[in-house]
Amino acid sequence: MISSAPVRNLDTQDPYAWIDKSMQTIHRANWYRQVKTIASQPGAVVELEGRSVLNFASNDYLGLAGDDRLKQAAIAAIHQYGTGSTGSRLLSGHRPIHRELEAAITQWKQTEDAIVFSSGYAANLGTISALVGVKDLILGDEYNHSSLKNGAKLSGATVLDYAHCDMAALQHRLEEHRGNYRRCLILTDSVFSMDGDLCPLPELLTLAETFNCMVLVDEAHGTGVLGSTGAGGVEHLGCSGKPLIHMGTLSKALGSLGGYVAGSAPLIDFLRNRAATWIYTTALSPADTAAALAAISIIQSEPARRQQLWARVAQLKTSLETQLGDGSSIQILPSESSIICLQVSNAETVLAASQQLLTQGIYAPAIRPPTVPTSRIRLSLMATHTTEHIEQLARAITLTVPG
Ligand SMILES: *Cc1c(COP(=O)(O)O)cnc(C)c1O
């Protein structure tokens, strides 16, 4: 007979009952989130739940997700190679366009090689967990993206955060802890996704060199947008060619789907042998691969798209600053990117503000805890917004957003 500890009310227990309770807590905190349906092409104007609205909620910074040339490239790749990539690249082989895309990323990022993953999230999980383990240390900016934080957890390394963009705090951590660990990996976004500000990369790289640390820079919101060739925040901050690990996504400014890591040839070869999220998953689809490849070529040959985006960013900042005035309770968070955030006092107010903007035809999401420490309206600008779109946005904000 198997003996076990007595359990009370075993047959009346529902092992899933906790979910209802948990959802009630989420509702009470105004943290509940729901998906809205867009039944149109991606772009500056979209059809959201049956009405036409100005879209400030997309990461499609250059308006390429709806570009005919990307569509044609994806369709051609489907005709040539089919819809599925049929398996892991190591076991089932890859298509020529997978290596062509990796070569294009390598050349753009000025590295020795690159590897593409099925998503940016998978790229971070697989890369971080391959590079460090239980004997190692990870130092990360407190505002880093979820994929960096979860990659760090998965690695089994000791993980310590440092205050946002605070290089003195990072140095302090290094002085105190670096000596106790084998390898050290510093993780940072180049453009912080929920704030829009930039990492002080030159200072960070100097610290990394002094303390013998690897550095992984997440360029999800920098690639295609920042830098003289659009290569990203690393280029913009004058750090091209420095020894670091470039990571980014194909799914934001590049208008496709997938992620990448670029760096030295040994690093990339190591990842092909050790990154579980690359080895044990199906290769990027031919359509996504071809669309990303087409996007890189357009971004490199059409700098005017980026210039247009920066002109819209400047226009919005100027109008908000003049219309809101000094005494305004709306605070524009410091930004050096195409992400501009308006800080609002709490989750309930920011939800109401986002809802009011929507009634005026403006789609601008409310970002709340636990995603960020303070509530805000997050505006994401696109090269394909017109000057009238920006004027309409600035007017609506002045009318509706409370402090
Ligand atoms: C979006 C994002 C990712 C994840 O990229 P996906 O390709 O969407 O999985 C990683 N890091 C940052 C900073 C991001 O904003």
Image (tube, helix red, strand yellow):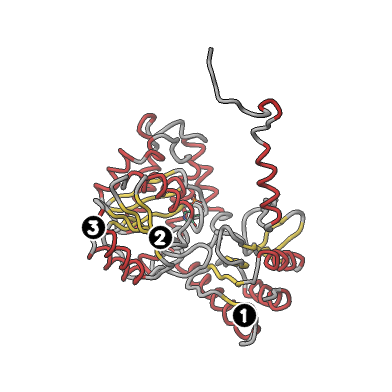
Q: Which mark is residue 270?
A: none
Q: Nearer the viewer, mark 1 or mark 2?
A: 2
Q: Residues within 10 Å of mark 3 (few under 14, many from 20)?
A: few
* Foreground residue among 403 and 272: 403
Pick the front one: 19 or 216: 19
Q: Quadrant of residue 369?
A: bottom right
Residue located beneath label 3 in the image: 179
Which residue is situated farthest in the top direction here?
1
Q: Is residue 291 visible?
A: yes
Q: Which residue is mark 1?
A: 320
Q: Position of residue 46 (x, y in %)?
A: 68, 58
Q: Secondary structure at mark 2?
A: strand
Q: Quadrant of residue 12?
A: top right
Whole-number angstrom distance, CA of label 1 to CA of label 2: 33 Å
Q: Nearer the viewer, mark 1 or mark 3?
A: 3
Query: Relative to 31, is 252 on the left or the right?
Result: left
The residue labelled by disc 2 is 161
The vertical placement of 239 against 13, above or below, is below
Residue at position x 68%, y 74% in the image: 397
Residue located 52% across and 54% down the image: 255
Q: Rounded to the nearest whole Å, what is the CA distance between mark 3 and mark 2?
A: 17 Å
Along the horizontal axis of the image, is 257 left or right of 349? left
Q: Looking at the image, is mark 1 or mark 3 earlier in the sequence?
A: 3
Sequence-wise first label, 3 or 2: 2
* Label 1 element class: helix
Left or right of residue 213: residue 86: right
Using the image as rendered, state which of residue 28 and residue 39 is in the foreground.
Answer: 28
> In the figure, 215 relative to 98: above or below?
below
